């Protein structure tokens, strides 16, 4: 009959073997995942530069609308899409307005964060992107006129 120490050693070996098998089968541990480069940050920075709107203002609107969750292209209860909650319903058409201002396809505005954030910036400024960005535009912190709630179609 094996001793208690031998049984404990056998159990520890079996547990170690099972742990190694599970880790090998499930792939790379989460801590070893590579940094994706913060695509949302890049999208906000690009839209801010293209529309001369403060990046933090765009990010705040996105956070207020959706907590920065695009919901993988699925609509909200108000039929709003993406991080910037571009709406397409009988009362509000910010999704269609974003498409007209940016030239982005509706499908991209619904499901692609980069396109959606660009569309949100276009709707909030009410103008297409300038052909060449300019820094002579007055500070949008004081000159920015449409309220985020009115532009988003929220009530």
Image (cartoon, rainbow, N blue to C red):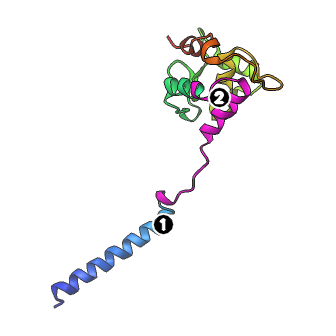
* Residue 100 rendering spot, x and y as whole percentages: 75, 18
* 113 and 49: which is toward the camera: 49
Q: Which residue is most to the right?
A: 131
Tell me the SS state at disc 2.
Answer: helix
**Residue 92: where, in percent of width, then height?**
61, 11
Is 41 located above or below residue 106 in the figure?
Answer: below
Say which residue label 1 marks. 25
Tell me which label, 1 or 2, sits earlier in the chain: 1
Q: Is residue 34 visible in this depiction of the protein? A: yes
Q: Quadrant of residue 108?
A: top right
Disc 2 marks which residue?
A: 116
Residue placed most toward the observer, 104 or 68: 68
Whether residue 109 is visible here, answered yes or no, is no
Query: In the image, is residue 35 part of the stretch drawn in magenta?
Result: yes
Q: Which residues are magenta?
A: 31-57
Determine whether, in the image, residue 58 is placed left or right of residue 130.
left
């Amino acid at each position: 009959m094996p001793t208690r120490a031998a049984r404990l050693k056998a159990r520890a070996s079996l547990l170690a073997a099972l742990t190694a098998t599970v880790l090998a089968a499930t792939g790379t541990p989460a801590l070893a995942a590579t940094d994706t480069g913060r695509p949302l940050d890049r999208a906000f920075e690009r839209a801010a530069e293209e529309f001369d709107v403060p990046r933090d203002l765009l990010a705040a609107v996105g956070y207020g609308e959706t907590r920065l969750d695009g919901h993988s292209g699925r609509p909200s209860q108000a039929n709003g899409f993406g991080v910037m909650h571009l709406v397409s319903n009988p009362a509000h058409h910010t999704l269609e307005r974003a498409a007209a201002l940016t030239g982005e396809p509706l499908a991209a505005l619904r499901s692609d964060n980069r396109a959606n954030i660009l569309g949100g910036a276009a709707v909030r400024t009410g103008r297409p992107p300038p052909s060449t960005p300019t820094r002579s535009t007055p500070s949008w912190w004081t000159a920015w006129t449409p309220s985020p709630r009115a532009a988003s179609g929220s009530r």
